[in-house]
Image: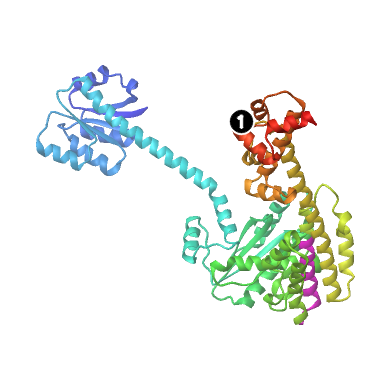
Amino acid sequence: MYKLLLVDDEEDVREGVSQEIDWEGFGFQIAAKAENGKEAWELVERLRPDLVVTDIKMPFMDGLQLAGLIREHYPATRIMILTGFDEFDYAQKAVRLDIDEYVLKPFSAVELIEGLLKVKKRMDEEAAYRENVQLLRESYEKSLPVLREVFLTSLMSANKLTRAEIMEKAREYGIKLGASAYLVATLCLDERNQEDRQLCLFAVKNIAQEYLGSSCPALLFHHNDQLVLLFLADEADNERKLYQRIQPVLEEIRRTVDKYMSFTVTIGIGTTVHDLTELAYSYENAMLALDYKAILGNNQLLFLEDVEQHTREKLRFDERKEHELVRCIKMGTYPELMTVMNELFREVEQGHVAIQEYRIYLLEIVTTILKTAKRTESESDTSQEWGGASDFLAEISTCNNLEEAKQILTLTCQKIMTRIAAGRHSSNKRLVDQAIDYTHRHYQSPDISIHRICAALHISPGYFSSLFKKETNMTFVTYLQSLRMEKAQELLRTTDLKTFEIAERVGFTDSNYFSFCFRKHVGISAKAYRNEVLEG
């Protein structure tokens, strides 16, 4: 319901207008009436009406003066003019004052209602717009913490945003990212099977926030079931000063968790970068530092610069090596496996590698082999084929030299490859058997085809055709034709059905084409075949 102020110096006009129109029925409530502009202005300031319906010619302050004050102080208030003055100069003033509507005296109730409804329509549209904007603003503000976290996590992986684009998004989300250098640290719960993991991470986050402040500015957020700290260096920081500044803070966080919680955390610290586009590199190194806890233990700070003293590119089991090893185990040959193993150990054989570095490298290879074996397990127990993870780990941990380690890895991979190949063959044979069974049950249908069988088996026609030929040494079309001819011969031997009836029974819609195929397959016509059987 909109509040309305009615202003006219003629009492009969005021009363007539207020009584002749069902104001509430049209969505208005007459909040007050005034007989001159000065009185009306006082009411406007006190009541703040949504709409002022005013005459122009009035004592003390006319309607246009009143409209001018309203526009200056309450621009959202709508104004409707009632006047008998239709001269050009008044019209010009009304336009300048952005009057919403005017009705010329004398006017009827219908004319006044039409004007009111026009104004109300615009007021309704503005109200709906303001409501939508408010809802959007509230929704955006509620989503802002999530949007900030998603944005920050996106910076931890390789992205194509430029520094300017990153800064623009940061400003949009209210995040300060301006700094001379950046450093990423990751906090990881040490207990892998920790119950209420998210609750524990929340508790660690609260502890971390207590120690992070103006002396050590950092952004803290969740990523990949861990907590990530993004430290921002000021102009006075060099790389050494930045490490010196964050180390006591991180150590206090670790110590507090250890003291007051029922679990511990290990913190991996990456390397310093000087550009926002390189944050993923610092995060990658922080995660790499965390990998060393398998050797160095939990509940400590792991600086990559400390645990990896040699050049990082010198010995790393990177994504390319991992992909090549996994591909070879799944689909490669024994000579290809030997090539991959030689490449994996070439860097170790050629360089002076610290034993700790070599053990981690070896552990990564072993982990990849075990993960590949686990992912490719069939219904039978894979451990029966290659000894299982326990025996493998025991063997690799007791090997005495590089060559022995290489031999153990190669032999284990070869056993897993054999198992995978056998499983693949079994799976392929099972698919072909299912296709043959389907064909035996539907060969009578003229519509049977590769596409129907593939739809039933949920495989692609191209893959099926290749698989079927490899397993049966014939194409599916040849097999179907052969099956139909065998069934036709059986019907010729055991029934008195006519040739065209037999053709229909084995899936042919054209008896002539059936006769052609039968002669081609058997060497004689169907009639001759039946006679030969009867005579024999």
Front residue (pair 504, 188): 504
Which residue is found at the position 81% from the left and 58% from the top?
A: 418
**Residue 313 relative to residue 490: left or right:** left
Q: What residue sits right under mark 1 in the picture? A: 511
Q: Give the range drawn in magenta.
A: 351-369
**Residue 447 relative to residue 91: left or right:** right
* Quadrant (top left, top right, bottom left, bottom right) of the C terminus: top right
Q: What residue type is labelled 1?
A: Ser
Secondary element under disc 1, as helix, strand or loop, is: helix
Q: Which picture quadrant has residue 337?
A: bottom right
Front residue (pair 376, 448): 448
Where does the image place residue 454, in percent across and percent down from the top left?
65, 41
Where does the image place residue 250, in percent across and percent down from the top left?
70, 66
**Residue 152 relative to residue 532: left or right:** left
Which residue is found at the position 56% from the left and 76% from the top?
A: 236
310 above or below 448?
Answer: below
Which residue is found at the position 26% from the left and 39% from the top?
A: 70
227 above or below 274?
Answer: above
* Quadrant (top left, top right, bottom left, bottom right) of the N terminus: top left
In this view of the protein, can residue 216 be seen by the observer?
A: no
Neighbor class of circle 1 (other Cα within 10 Å; few <14, some 14-19, many 20+) is some
Where does the image place residue 88, in percent across and percent down from the top left?
10, 37
Residue that sits furthest to the top in the current view: 20
Q: Characterize the magenta stretch by its predominant secondary structure.
A: helix
Where does the image place residue 494, in percent across and percent down from the top left?
77, 26
